[in-house]
Amino acid sequence: MANETLEKAVELYTKRQYNSAKILLDSIIFTYPDLKQIVRSSKDMMNVVYLTEQERNLQFLDSLLNIREAEVEPLLKYFQEEDPQASNPILISKKQSVGSSFDRALVKAHTDRNGQFFISTHYTGTSPIHHYAVKAEVDELYALSDTITDDALNHSFSDGNEYWESIRFKNATDNGVGEFIASNADRKIRISFITPKGTGYKFLLTETDKQAISETYYLATLLRETIHIKGQIRNVRTALKHHRSASNNSAIIKK
C-alpha cells in the first residue's frame, strides 16, 4: 500500500496536482516510519514537489515584476526629484513643483522610490497661523492628522513681509489624510490647517492638487508592490538554492 500510495503521488505530481501529491507523501512518511527506503523516497519526492512549486512561483513573480515595472516607468516622467543628490530622493508631482506652490496654501504629496508615501502642508500669508495639524473633509466624512510640533518636521520662517509654514507628516502621522484625499479626488475636499486658536485656516483643495496627490499615492502603491515582489523573489531564490542540493541526489529525479 505504501508503494501504491507513492506511485499515486508521483502520478498526481505529473498532473500538476501538487497539494494532493504532498498530502499522500505526508501520509506515507507518518504512517509507515519503519519502511525506511519508501519513506526516504517519499521525502525525496516531497522535495521535488517543493522545488517545482517554488520554480513556478518564481516564474509568476518574475512576470508580475515585469508588469509592475512597466506600469511604473511611464508614470515617472510626471514626477521630479526634490533633491537629486539625496541618497533616497523624494519624488513629487510636477503639478506641485516649487514654482507652482511657493506662494499659496496647499497639501503636497511625496513618495520615495521604495513607495514610502507622505504628505506635507504649506502655508503662505501676511501673518503666521502656527498650524500643527491638517484635516480633510468631504461632506460629513473627514480625516485628521496627528499633532506635529517637532521642529525637525514643523518649519516656519519670514522675510519680514510674508510668512511661510510647512509640516511634513512622515511615518503615517497624517493618519490617512493623504489616502483620504486620493480616494475622494473626484469630490470637493475642504482642508483645515489646525491652529492654536482652534479656528483653523480653511480652503478648498484645487483640482490640480487633488490629481497630484491621487497620482502620487498610486505611484507609491506600485513602488511598494514592486519592492515587495523583489523581496519575495529573493526569498524564493534562497529557498531554491537551499533545496536543490538535496533534490540533485533524489533517486526519483534520476528515475
Image (cartoon, rainbow, N blue to C red):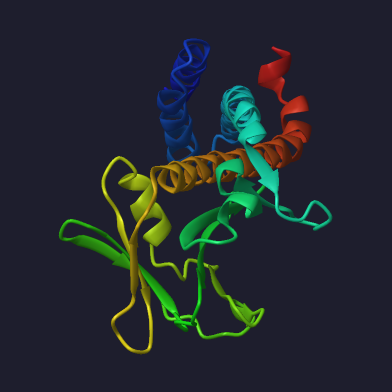
**In terms of image quadrants, where is residue 98?**
bottom right
Q: Quick one: quadrant of the C terminus?
A: top right
Q: Is residue 241 visible?
A: yes
Most foreground residue, 249 or 37 = 249
**In terms of image quadrants, where is residue 138?**
bottom left
Q: Quick one: quadrant of the N terminus?
A: top left
Q: Which residue lies furthest to the left in this view?
A: 140
Most foreground residue, 15 or 91 = 91
Is 37 located above or below residue 192 in the figure?
Answer: above
Is 56 located above or below residue 150 in the figure?
Answer: above
Horizontal relation, residue 33 to residue 197: left or right: right
Q: Residue 136, how many percent across, how many down?
A: 32, 62
Is 16 located above or below residue 131 in the figure?
Answer: above
Q: Residue 90, how many percent across, how many down?
A: 68, 54
Horizontal relation, residue 143 to residue 133: left or right: left
Horizontal relation, residue 154 to residue 183: left or right: right
Q: Residue 232, how many percent across, how many down?
A: 61, 41
The residue sitting at 60% across, 38% down in the picture is: 226
Q: Residue furthest front?
A: 161
Q: Residue 230, how many percent across, how many down?
A: 66, 39
The residue sitting at 80% across, 51% down in the picture is: 84
